[in-house]
Image (spheres, rainbow, N blue to C red):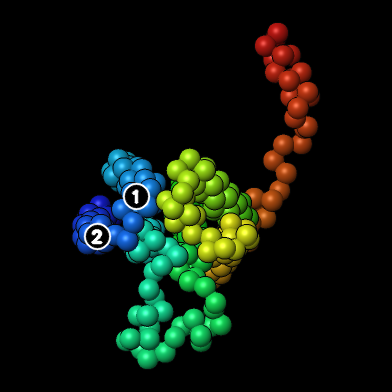
């Protein structure tokens, strides 16, 4: 199956998931707010799949994350009935088994954000920015962490703007003053695990891994920048 056909297949499946979970959500306003960024992301993917098709691995990881997000948007993250599902279908409480005292679906999704999206971000970095070696793992981790922080700021701004029950539902802190910090930490941990897995796979498969890693950490420019570079530019312009 070609990358584009695979993209259309996952898009069709996601559209069905989206449509089903759009029916009678717990809080329609929160559902709409949760899906604002999803809409932007979907448009970007739709506009770039021809000129910049991602790997099937990246599309699959993105698809899984978006499906998890849609579940959270349908119920609101703080009220996803995963524990009731485990009790009803598997006969035990996941919260009790793991010692959780709150609804941790949001924590799982924040962890999944790093675990599932760090690799697509790496693919973008490697193919567009040409990052190799150490930087091909560090920059995707860094951007995943930074985007997680930016999303927390977005949540804060949205909650301040809309306020009331909608703001509370969107934040989903459940009374935890460290909620944003824990969310960012879990996203960072997920991304770190994803990059470590990718690193070990490449160590095993890539024959030039060591030389590429060493080259990425070598000094490429011996001359200092800043005022020295400005002086060199001005000198070249005069010449």
Judge by depth and name the residue closer to the eye, 224 or 119.
119
Judge by depth and name the residue closer to the eye, 72 or 118.
72
* Residue at x 36%, y 58% (from the top left corner): 73
Rendered image: mark on residue 29: 1
Can residue 135 be seen from the camera position used here? yes
Q: In the displayed structure, would residue 160 be above or below residue 80?
A: above
Judge by depth and name the residue closer to the eye, 59 or 110.
110
Does 66 sit left or right of 212 as displayed? left
Q: In the displayed structure, would residue 159 be above or below residue 9?
A: above
* Residue at x 32%, y 61% (from the top left corner): 26
Q: Specify the quadrant that holds the C terminus.
A: top right
Can residue 199 be seen from the camera position used here? no
The outermost residue toward the top is 238
Q: Specify the quadrant that holds the N terminus.
A: bottom left
Question: What is the quadrant of residue 17 in the picture?
Answer: bottom left
Mark closest to the chain's N terminus, 2 or 1: 2
Residue located beneath label 2 in the image: 24
| Residue 97 screen position, x and y as percent | 51, 87
| Residue 19 screen position, x and y as percent | 22, 57
Look at the numbered disc 1 and give the secondary structure of its residue: helix
* Residue at x 41%, y 79% (from the top left corner): 83
| Residue 133 screen position, x and y as percent | 60, 55
* Residue at x 33%, y 46% (from the top left corner): 39
Q: CA distance from mark 2 to mark 1?
A: 11 Å
């Amino acid at each position: 199956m070609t990358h584009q056909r695979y993209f259309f297949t996952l898009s069709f499946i996601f559209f069905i998931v989206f449509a089903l979970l759009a029916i009678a959500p717990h809080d329609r306003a929160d559902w709409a707010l949760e899906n604002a960024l999803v809409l932007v992301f979907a448009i970007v993917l739709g506009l770039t799949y021809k000129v910049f098709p991602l790997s099937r691995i990246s599309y699959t990881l993105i698809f899984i994350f978006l499906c998890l997000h849609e579940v959270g948007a349908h119920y609101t993250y703080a009220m996803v009935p995963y524990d009731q599902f485990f009790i009803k279908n598997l006969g035990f409480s996941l919260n009790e088994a793991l010692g959780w005292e709150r609804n941790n679906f949001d924590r799982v999704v924040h962890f999944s954000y790093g675990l599932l999206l760090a690799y697509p971000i790496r693919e973008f970095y490697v193919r567009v920015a040409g990052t190799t070696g150490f930087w091909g793992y560090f920059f995707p981790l860094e951007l995943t962490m930074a985007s997680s922080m930016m999303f927390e700021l977005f949540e804060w701004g949205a909650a301040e703007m809309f306020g009331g029950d909608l703001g509370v539902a969107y934040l989903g802190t459940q009374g935890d003053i460290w909620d944003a910090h824990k969310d960012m930490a879990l996203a960072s941990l997920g991304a770190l695990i994803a990059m470590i897995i990718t690193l070990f796979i490449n160590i095993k498969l890539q024959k030039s891994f060591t030389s590429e890693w060493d080259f990425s950490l070598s000094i490429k420019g011996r001359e200092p920048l800043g005022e020295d570079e400005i002086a060199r530019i001005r000198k070249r312009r005069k010449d």
